[in-house]
Image (tube, coloured by chain):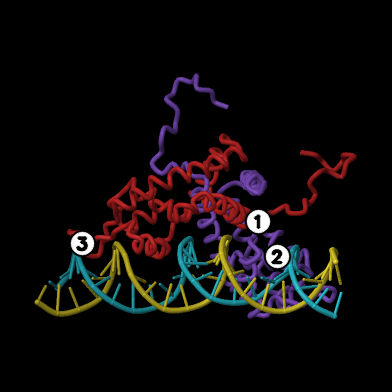
Chain colours: A red, B purple, C yellow, D cyan
Amino acid sequence: MASSTGGRPTEAPLASSETLCNCLAVRQAARQITQLYDEELAGTGLRATQYAVLSRLSRIAPATVQDLAEALVMDRTTLAHNLKPLEREGLVVMGVAAHDRRVRELRLTPAGTAKLQEARVAWARAQARFEHAFGAEDAAELRRQLARAVEAVRT
Amino acid sequence: MASSTGGRPTEAPLASSETLCNCLAVRQAARQITQLYDEELAGTGLRATQYAVLSRLSRIAPATVQDLAEALVMDRTTLAHNLKPLEREGLVVMGVAAHDRRVRELRLTPAGTAKLQEARVAWARAQARFEHAFGAEDAAELRRQLARAVEAVRT
DNA sequence: GACAGACACGTGCATATGCACTTAGATGAG
DNA sequence: CTCATCTAAGTGCATATGCACGTGTCTGTC
């Protein structure tokens, strides 16, 4: 690709904000995209992470803390912290498993289910805004690559 | 790419952890990749974000808070918080601009420059680990797409 | 039954993130 | 000069993130 024998000094010797660091690149994108989703979710009182927790829990409930954390690709202790405001607001309840008192059984409350339904509308707006700007097909491919990156790091 | 006229029922009707949310996908990847970089940087006492701050500042110093924040695609107030431990450790100094006493002039101290040099080695290990697992070319393309996503959201 | 070890989860700490609000300094209109 | 206004940056709060460590519970071994 574009050997040094050309006439033009090439178009990308070092763009002003050319980031070589994969970590910085993904964190910058995460900050920007989170702000967009948070902006749309603001009216519901939920943050992007909280929406993700409720949404995933609704599909796998009843779930243990460890199972939900793995499903969210999140540290177990991070999820424990993130659950606190959701429990305080009465959107999630944590029971104790009958067969093993160490294990928790996480579920959505009726209020949690209702809040999730409400938030899905706001989430869809954010999703649409991003994909309108970035491209729906490109977004799907980006999600695939990000998922592959998660797997690559886990290995 | 791959029209629907194939014979196979396609390979992805709904994988178990198929994430449709762009925000969740990028945050999950950011968490995993950050852990990898933090692991390599642990010996230096720097976190991934702190390395990013020092690295960027070394290229644009002296910089104002706002300029450095923009270069990092970070909220101005977030950077203000992130600078505190770096100032406390004596890696960064914040002076006052002579022409306008509201403006700060951020610079690396000699200790900060030395720490950055040391951390570059650890960063390179993390970068190599990720690109070995994910693919160097694919990583470059991923960074381009993430940068494009940042621009798309900004617009 | 007693106990070592494994296991699920919680807590404390430090940093990361950004919104709302505040403070200090600069600047132009009068 | 005075003041309204604009601007650069700081602060308080709540959540996000994960490591190190602690607590309670189960399980196999004796």
Picture quadrant of residue B120? bottom right
Residue B112 is situated, as x and y percent measured from the top left of the image, at: 71, 75
In this rendering, position of residue B92 left or right of residue A117: right
Which is nearer the eye, A137 or D7? D7
Look at mark 2 in the image and give the residue it sits on: B55
Numbered label attached to residue A100: 3
Q: How many marks?
A: 3
Picture quadrant of residue A102? bottom left
Numbered label attached to residue B87: none
Point 39% across, 56% down: residue: A69
Let me know if residue A65 appears in the view: yes
| Chain ID at mark 3 | A
Which amino acid, by three-letter code, is at mark 1?
Cys
Residue C21 is situated, as x and y percent measured from the top left of the image, at: 58, 70
Which is nearer the eye, B146 or A7? B146
- Graded by Cα atoms within 10 Å as few (under 14), some (14 to 19) or many (20 or more), the crowding at tag 3 reads few
In this rendering, position of residue A16 left or right of residue B141: right
Point 82% across, 41% down: residue: A3
**Cβ atoms under marks 1 and 2 closer than 8 Å:** yes
Point 68% across, 80% down: residue: B90
Residue A119 is situated, as x and y percent measured from the top left of the image, at: 43, 47
Which is nearer the eye, A8 or C21? C21
| Chain ID at mark 1 | A
Q: Residue furthest right?
A: A7
Numbered label attached to residue A21: 1
| Chain ID at mark 2 | B
Which amino acid, by three-letter code, is at mark 2?
Ser
Residue D1 is situated, as x and y percent measured from the top left of the image, at: 85, 80
Sequence-wise, which precedes: disc 3 or disc 1?
1
Which amino acid, by three-letter code, is at mark 3?
Asp
